[in-house]
Amino acid sequence: MDIEKELRLEIKSQLEKVTEANSPELFSRLQTPEGYAGIEDVIINQVVATGVTPAALIPQLETEYSMM
């Protein structure tokens, strides 16, 4: 399996844990295919740029989105 596919599977696994209770902003955005794709792209870019894991990025994104 290539690295991109592994990363996308890990992101999917982590995003499946997002609920309206624990991450309302992300949860709302994840309700459409376009929203999921946008969040996935942000996570991929951040993983590549910073090396931070998807699991660590999700709470950071929730905080950023809730401040918008």
Image (cartoon, rainbow, N blue to C red):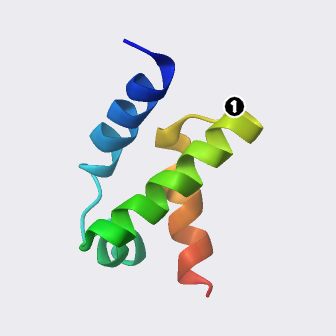
Residue 46 location (% of width, % of height): 66, 46
Query: Can you identify the residue that label 1 sits on?
Result: 51
- How many labels, in total? 1
Viewport quadrant of the C terminus: bottom right
Residue 22 spot, x, y in % from top left: 33, 65
Q: Residue at x 39, y 40 (%)?
A: 11
Q: In this view, which residue lies farthest toward the right?
A: 49
Along the viewing direction, whichever of 38 and 47 lies nearer the viewer: 38
What residue is at 69 percent from the left and 31 percent from the top?
A: 51
Asked if 45 appears above or below 37 in the picture, the reply is above
Q: Position of residue 48 (x, y in %)?
A: 68, 35
- With respect to residue 12, does 53 lie above or below? above
- Which sits in the foreground, 47 or 67? 47
64, above or below 67, in the image:
above
Direction top: furthest residue: 1
Identified at 33% across, 32% down, the residue is 9
Q: Residue at x 36, y 75 (%)?
A: 29
Q: Is residue 2 above or below residue 68?
A: above
- On-image quarter of the N terminus: top left
Viewer can see residue 16: yes
Q: Residues within 10 Å of mark 1 (few under 14, many from 20)?
A: few
Circle 1 — which element?
Answer: loop
> Amino acid under label 1?
Gly
- Quarter of image, res 5: top left
Whole-percent x and y of residue 6? 40, 23
Is residue 21 something that shows in the picture? no
Which residue occupies the extreme bottom position in the image?
Answer: 68
